[in-house]
Image (cartoon, rainbow, N blue to C red):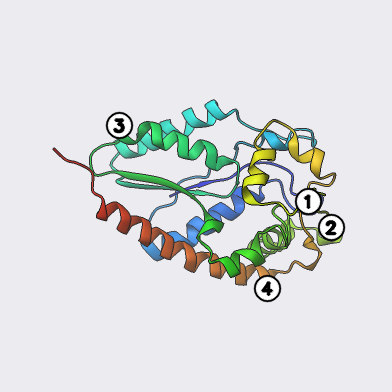
Amino acid sequence: MIPVGSTEQHGPHSPYGTDAILASEVAARLSRRIGALVAPPFSYGLSGDHKGYPGIPFLKAKTMIDFVQDVVMSLAEGGFREIILVNGHYTNVIVLSAALMEIGEKLPKGTIAFPFNYWDALPPDQLAKYLSSEVGLHANVGETSAVMAIDPSLVKLEHAVREYPEFPVEPSPAMVSAYFFSALGTLPRASRSGVWGDPSQSSAERGREYLDQIEEACVRFVENVEATFRAFPEDTK
């Protein structure tokens, strides 16, 4: 498993490494359940929508695609037959899917590789409490609490602010993607603080609850994906 994150602002209260920290934690928990190894995380990602906040490093899509393909191909050629990209930064999913689609036929026979956003495994009721338009989608109570559960010293909750982008209508996932994926620097136009939500009620206790739910959901998700690959095997002729 390869944790995939980013290095970007998470409001004035949370660390720049939030996405990589959470993806790494999820991968570590999942690895213990399914008997997998965890590779070093990808700590830079497709964070161009954050351009405009101070000190935001980000990759171009083509750069990240090349990087992902090189790592996955080398792992596969080295003998790994299942490679899972555990994504912790939403925008990365664009390039992760594209990268694997382009090299799928080049992987050694019997090898499977797939990406997923760890939160997408959650059932709807749990997802709504962790990441949603209601509780927020960035540096919110879910992400902040999860980081606090891992290392509370990384969060300065006294600096937390509440902010929601003022969308003209209730934003749907498709609407969010249409706007934020359209250009560099879209998030600073929508959020002055870089927060989307209200992290002020975050706690390590909440974070442990969220992470336990995520762990269980990800175990089920990976088992179901593996079953799907078995149901539709590669043509070996």
Q: Mark 4 points at which residue?
A: 205
Label 1 amino acid?
Val
Q: Residue 106 carries which label?
A: 3
Circles 2 and 1: CB distance less than 8 Å? yes
Q: Residue 104 carries which label?
A: none
Which residue is at 74% across, 36% downward?
A: 186
Q: Mark 2 points at which residue?
A: 162
The image position of residue 81, as x and y in percent, is 29, 46
Tell me the CA gap for discs 4 and 2: 20 Å
Circles 4 and 2: CB distance less than 8 Å? no
Residue depth check, mark 4 versus mark 3: number of the one nearer the observer: 3
Vertical placement of 84 versus 47: above or below?
Answer: below
Residue depth check, mark 4 versus mark 2: number of the one nearer the observer: 2
Instruction: Identify the secondary structure beneath mark 3.
Output: helix
Label 4 amino acid?
Glu
Tell me the CA gap for discs 4 and 3: 45 Å
Q: Residue 195 carries which label?
A: 1
